[in-house]
Image (spheres, helix red, strand yellow):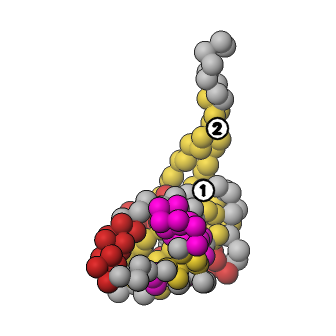
């Protein structure tokens, strides 16, 4: 089997699923892309074997943090693993302020519930002055991108801002420009 993208965790999980379904030693992850599978010797059994393993369920880990940008179309795709560190950003006349406030929710006494922490994000956008904006740690990149798009930022503006955030160490993700 040859996976579309290099991912050691996925290759390991594919081999594990095949070995669980077809017996230990049937599959072995060779690297992050290739899983070597021992096929049945009889050609008639191979179709059934492949049919069995092609629909096996996998428990996959979260993907690596990644932002994919297409400046030509203005498309921005952000996966769930992307996070931001504290930073301040100014770009031309675009200003976005993202404030992230922790909110604690406690259950009633004796209810058996658990205390949980969530984030309340407030976004204010303006299009004048070119002021410096500060982004607190934990701010969601999706909120920043949404605010910049609502303000009329071009795909090239967005690309420049995200690349600057990455260079400054505030964007915890890989950037891919297609």
Q: Secondary structure at mark 2?
A: strand
Q: CA distance from mark 2 to mark 1?
A: 14 Å
Name the quadrant containing residue 120.
top right
Which portion, as a residue range, is magenta?
Answer: 1-25
Instruction: Determine if residue 29 is in view.
Output: yes
Q: Residue at x 33, y 76 (%)?
A: 45
Please name whichever residue, 132 or 135, is drawn nearer the observer in this view of the structure. Answer: 135
Mark 1 — residue?
139
**Which quadrant: the C terminus?**
bottom left
Q: Give the residue displayed 47% in from the left and 61% down from the top.
A: 21
Question: Residue 10, position in %: x, y?
Answer: 54, 71
Task: Describe residue 125's horizontal placement relative to residue 133 as left or right.
Answer: left
At x 65%, y 12%, the residue is: 110
Residue 131 picture location, percent across and down: 59, 67
Instruction: Determine if the magenta segment contains residue 126.
Output: no
Q: Quadrant of residue 40?
A: bottom left
Q: Is 10 in the magenta?
A: yes
Predominant secondary structure, magenta span: helix
């Amino acid at each position: 089997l040859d996976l579309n993208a290099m991912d050691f965790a996925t290759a390991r999980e594919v081999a594990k699923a095949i070995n669980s379904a077809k017996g230990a030693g049937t599959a072995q992850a060779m690297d992050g892309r290739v899983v070597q599978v021992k096929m049945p010797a009889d050609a008639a059994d191979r179709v059934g074997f492949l049919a069995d393993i092609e629909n096996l369920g996998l428990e996959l880990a979260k993907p690596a943090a990644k932002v994919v940008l297409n400046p030509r179309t203005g498309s921005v795709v952000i996966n769930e693993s992307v996070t931001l560190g504290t930073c301040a950003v100014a770009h031309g006349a675009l200003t976005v302020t993202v404030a992230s406030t922790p909110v604690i929710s406690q259950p009633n006494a004796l209810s058996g519930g658990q205390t949980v922490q969530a984030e309340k994000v407030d976004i204010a956008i303006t299009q004048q002055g070119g002021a410096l904006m500060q982004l607190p740690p934990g701010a969601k990149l999706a909120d920043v991108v949404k605010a910049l798009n609502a303000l009329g930022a071009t795909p090239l503006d967005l690309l420049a801002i995200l690349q600057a955030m990455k260079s400054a160490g505030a964007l915890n993700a890989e950037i891919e420009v297609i």
